[in-house]
Image: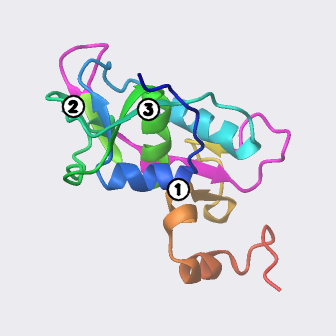
Amino acid sequence: MAEAKPDFIKYENLLSDIDSGRVKIPQFQREYVWSKEDAAKLIDSVLRGYPIGTFILWKTRDTLRSIRDIGGLKLKDAPLDDSIYYVLDGQQRITSLYAGIKGVSIKRENFKSKKLDIIEDFSQIYIDLTAEENDEQIVVTEVENLSEIQYISLNELLEGDLIRLVNKFKDSELININ
């Protein structure tokens, strides 16, 4: 009998495995239910270096008949003859990290009214560049009270065009580019 062994995976490798179709959700897991605000709080904890718990993934070459993609997003099929990681614990956190970093929209059933589907745009998770280290939250979803150079979307920061970002903030007092 194989024993479970802990392994450490960098976030970038986890995201790459999701993109490649190697991370899947077994059908028996509940739907993704976290809000964009919940995802922002999780990402805030990651940026502050707070522990966010462990993920339990089952690595196997077996293919389950009933699987779902992360957050209901249609992702690539798993490579043939390659291991698949089935998420046994941590689906809400993994999906929140993926959706926030990739800036994707997730469509899901509105659990409150059971009538209309809702689409939540996770590209609207931002870093408040004016926030202090001890402020309540650095990662936010509301930016109406901030000027355009006082925040940056998480997706733009992590996956954006560096030249465009430098040009956007070059005259800002928030960033010293010298």
Q: Gap between marks 2 and 3, in whole Å?
A: 14 Å
**Label 2 is placed on what type of residue?**
Ile
Q: Is the magenta stretch mostly helix, strand or loop?
A: loop
Find residue 49 and report its image quarter. top right
81 sits to left or right of 56: left
Residue 4: tell me if it is visible: yes
Verify CB contact (< 8 Å) between mark 2 and mark 3: no
Magenta stretch containing residue 45, yes or no? no
- Residue sitting nearer the eye, 30 or 57: 57
Most foreground residue, 56 or 11: 56
Q: On the image, which quarter does residue 130 sit in? A: bottom right
Q: Which residue is drawn at 58% across and 63% down?
A: 157
Mark seen at residue 57: 3
Percent x, y of residue 100: 48, 46
Q: Going 49% across and 25% down the picture, which residue do you hit? A: 3
Percent coordinates x, y for residue 42 in the rendering: 60, 34
User: Going by the image, does 38 lie left or right of 25?
Assistant: right
What is the magenta range? 109-138
Residue 12 bears which disc, if any? 1
For the question of whether residue 119 can be seen, the reply is: no
Amino acid at circle 1:
Glu
Marks 2 and 1, the one that precedes in the sequence: 1
Residue 16 in the image, given as x and y percentages of width and height = 42, 56
The nearer-to-camera label among 2 and 3 is 3
